């Protein structure tokens, strides 16, 4: 491909006319292909150095950077950002991920200089407002969950899981119960649950799901023993079902001297309606970047605060905010601390501001309504599609996500993957595929509360049309999809096994490479 130095590929057609509304933009070259090393985006005067203060370590090769002006560099990144779906450009029905709208008020608050321009090493007396914000956020999280303590600092859900399980481990070591080496994980769990347990050296014992998609309390009781440290249970679970026997499970786990870790990534379905502490949980991470609308995707930033029960509160990490004699203070060391800190500094301040803004602008009643609307929307999608799709667990109403399986595609030559790819051509991000694993060819759809009925109807119309087309024998459309994306089907295995992480100038590559 040839391209001009403005970054527009030549001979490919014009970028982004948006005529069809669903096609994405054509290819975007790399920054180094747009700019060259001969030019610079800025004019710097020649500086005559009196003395070399680098002790002979000055660079003597050319600085190999693409010389671009600010608008050239900015346009490159904006064009890149338009090559993909985003929650700001369309519905993102990705199950378990809670991709909801991030209200712009959140962004406005996060940009206030008193939050955005402070430094983690500033004296506490100069950041009282930020500490107050962390204090209030902690209060909301503990109140919403009815728990005794919270650690704000983990930087993602999986990081929170690690911290919660470390607290459980520390509590058991303090009771001379380090022999507890088994963690029970239901088969419907998110992959991070068994990974967390294994990372801490536990052996993972899977708990089978019942035919109706929920966890079998008898199977939990049978698996409990003096060697079990904890159960890691998600509620609502990843089939979108509220575990009806969660209290009985918590009771059995506690009776066996073990702890109840709850994966709270699905808290969006119950916030303001159910307090997990009332169900008997001991530790639970909350994904601020899911439930509380802070942005996520593309790897971050996230925030996964962990709430802890009375029994685990003494094992919380530092730092935390406390009221001292001279106002709020950040406690960075405590006597006999079990864990120390889980991250440098204090966590993702920008996410704290966005999350608290979301909470305060909704109020307690508004949060409950958001959860109810999320559940309503998921049930609406299920009700509109259950006649054309197949529903693996029809007995229960769903919580925040609607789960379908691939049995409606039987005999069509269309797989779940093909179906999801066809959705891209219709302008929607695909749903979650092949997860949870307990369902064959799973399609997990989480609309969230932030989509209007009009958007849901358009999505359901497209889904129903696709399903009808697949069943009528038009497999070609699905197997060829996506047709309108800048990349078609990727060789994902090769991309994972042989990633090309470094760009080299074509003139530097070995000549033989043809
Ligand atoms: C997203 C998610 C996680 C992990 O959260 P990250 O912030 O991505 O690390 C864990 N469990 C469930 C059920 C999730 O949906």
Image: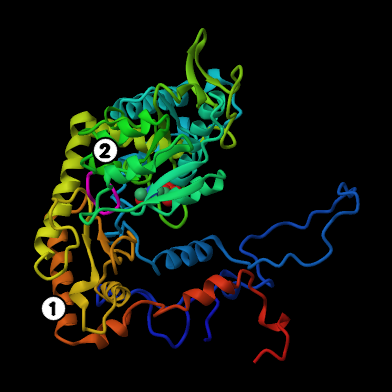
146, above or below 91, in the image = above
- Residue 354 shown left or right of residue 505 in the figure: left
Residue, disc 2: 246
Decide if residue 302 is in sight here. no
Residue furthest out toward the top: 325
Q: Position of residue 273 (x, y in %)?
A: 20, 34
Q: Position of residue 256 (x, y in %)?
A: 39, 31
Could you say which is closer to the camera, residue 195 or residue 329?
Answer: 195
- Label 1 packing within 10 angstroms: few (<14), some (14-19), many (20+): some
- Residue 234 shown left or right of residue 181 in the figure: left
Dominant secondary structure (helix, strand or loop) of the stretch shown in magenta:
loop
Circle 2: element type: helix
Which residue sits at x=33%, y=40%? 221
Q: Are discs 1 and 2 less than 8 Å apart at CB?
A: no
Which residue sits at x=24%, y=51%? 240
Residue, disc 1: 468
Q: Which residues are magenta?
A: 237-242
397, above or below 476, in the image = above
Decide if residue 381 is in sight here. yes
Q: Can you say which quadrant of the picture contains the C terminus?
A: bottom right
Decide which of tag 1 and tag 2 comes sooner along the chain: 2
Circle 1: element type: helix
Quarter-of-image position of residue 217:
top left
The scheme the figure's colours follow is: rainbow
Q: Position of residue 278 (x, y in %)?
A: 27, 27
Whether residue 241 is in magenta: the answer is yes
């Amino acid at each position: 491909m040839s391209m001009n130095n403005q970054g527009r590929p030549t001979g490919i057609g014009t970028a982004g006319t948006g005529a069809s509304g669903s096609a994405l933009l054509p290819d975007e070259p790399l920054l180094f292909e747009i700019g060259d090393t001969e030019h610079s985006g800025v004019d710097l005067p020649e500086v005559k150095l009196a003395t070399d203060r680098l002790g002979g370590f000055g660079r003597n090769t050319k600085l190999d950077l693409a010389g671009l002006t600010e608008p050239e560099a900015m346009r490159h990144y904006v064009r890149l950002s338009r090559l993909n779906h985003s929650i700001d450009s369309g519905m993102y029905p990705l199950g378990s991920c809670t991709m909801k709208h991030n209200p712009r008020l959140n962004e406005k608050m996060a940009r206030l200089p008193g939050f955005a321009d402070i430094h983690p090493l500033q004296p506490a007396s100069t950041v009282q407002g930020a500490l107050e914000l962390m204090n209030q956020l902690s209060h909301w999280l503990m109140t919403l969950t009815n728990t005794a303590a919270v650690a704000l600092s983990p930087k993602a859900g999986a990081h929170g899981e690690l911290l919660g399980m470390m607290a459980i481990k520390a509590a058991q070591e303090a009771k001379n119960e380090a022999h507890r080496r088994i963690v029970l994980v239901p088969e419907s769990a998110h992959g991070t649950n068994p990974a967390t347990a294994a990372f801490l050296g536990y052996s993972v014992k899977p708990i089978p799901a019942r035919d109706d998609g929920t966890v079998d309390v008898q199977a939990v009781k049978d698996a409990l023993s003096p060697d079990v440290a904890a159960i890691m249970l998600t509620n609502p679970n990843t089939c979108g079902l509220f575990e009806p026997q969660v209290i009985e499970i918590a009771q059995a786990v506690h009776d066996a001297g073990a702890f109840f870790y709850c994966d709270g990534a699905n808290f969006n379905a119950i916030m303001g309606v159910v307090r997990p502490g009332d169900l008997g949980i001991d530790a639970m991470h909350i994904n601020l970047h899911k439930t509380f609308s802070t942005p996520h995707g593309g790897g971050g930033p996230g925030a996964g605060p962990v709430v802890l029960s009375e029994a685990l509160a003494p094992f919380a990490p530092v730092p935390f905010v406390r009221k001292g004699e001279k106002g709020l203070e950040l406690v960075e060391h405590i006597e006999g601390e079990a864990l120390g800190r889980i991250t440098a500094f204090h966590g993702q301040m920008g996410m704290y501001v966005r999350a608290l803004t979301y909470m305060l602008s909704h109020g307690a009643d508004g949060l409950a309504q958001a959860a109810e609307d999320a559940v309503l929307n998921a049930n609406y999608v299920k009700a509109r599609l259950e006649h054309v799709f197949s529903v693996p667990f029809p007995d229960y109403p769903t919580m925040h996500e609607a789960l379908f399986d691939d049995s409606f595609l039987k005999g069509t030559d269309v797989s779940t993957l093909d179906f999801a790819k066809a959705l891209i051509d219709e302008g929607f991000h695909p749903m979650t595929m092949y997860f949870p694993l307990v369902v064959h060819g799973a399609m997990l759809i989480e609309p969230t509360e932030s989509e209007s009925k009009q958007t849901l109807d358009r999505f359901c119309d497209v889904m129903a049309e696709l399903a009808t087309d697949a069943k009528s024998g038009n497999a070609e459309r699905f197997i060829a999809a996506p047709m309108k994306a800048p990349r078609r089907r990727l060789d994902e295995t090769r991309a994972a096994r042989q990633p090309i992480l470094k760009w080299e100038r074509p003139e530097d590559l070995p000549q033989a490479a043809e």
